[in-house]
Image (cartoon, rainbow, N blue to C red):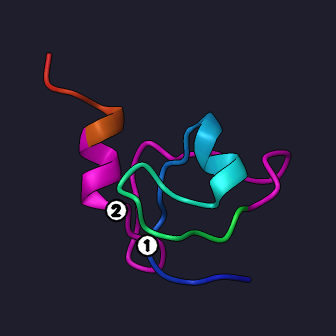
């Protein structure tokens, strides 16, 4: 099981293995994982990916 920050991945990122912030990522099975609304101490969210997926309104 990978550890570290959780990153958001676009459709292109699924092919390239890159997050929205361009960090290399380990892709997880989407049936078991989804982008959470908030992180926790063990799985903090990447603040760059969070900003890119939740733009200011």
- Mark 2 highlights which residue? 46
Which residue corresponds to the image point at 36% horizontal and 35% vertical from the top-left? Answer: 53
Which residue corresponds to the image point at 43% horizontal and 42% vertical from the top-left? Answer: 37
Q: Is residue 36 left or right of residue 52?
A: right
Q: Is residue 49 left or right of residue 5?
A: left
In the displayed structure, would residue 54 be above or below residue 29? above
Taking the magenta stretch, the answer to whether it contains residue 50 is yes
Dominant secondary structure of the magenta stretch?
Answer: loop
Residue 28 image offset from top left, x and y in percent: 75, 61
Q: Is residue 8 left or right of residue 33?
A: left
14 or 54: nearer the viewer: 14
In the displayed structure, would residue 12 be above or below residue 28? above
Contact, mark 2 vs mark 1 (Cβ under 8 Å): yes
- State the residue lying farthest toward the left: 56
Residue 1 image offset from top left, x and y in percent: 74, 83
Q: Which residues are magenta?
A: 28-51
SS for dot 2: loop
Quarter of the image that includes the C terminus:
top left
Which residue corresponds to the image point at 40% horizontal and 59% vertical from the top-left? Answer: 22
Label annotation for residue 5: 1
- State the residue lying farthest toward the top: 57
Taking the magenta stretch, the answer to whether it contains residue 29 is yes
SS for dot 1: loop
> In the figure, residue 29 lies in which quadrant?
bottom right
Residue 30 image offset from top left, x and y in percent: 78, 47
């Amino acid at each position: 099981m990978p550890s570290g920050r959780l990153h958001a991945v676009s459709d292109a990122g699924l092919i390239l293995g890159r997050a929205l912030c361009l960090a290399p990522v380990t892709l997880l099975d989407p049936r078991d994982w989804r982008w959470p609304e908030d992180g926790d101490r063990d799985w903090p969210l990447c603040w760059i990916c969070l900003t890119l997926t939740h733009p200011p309104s």
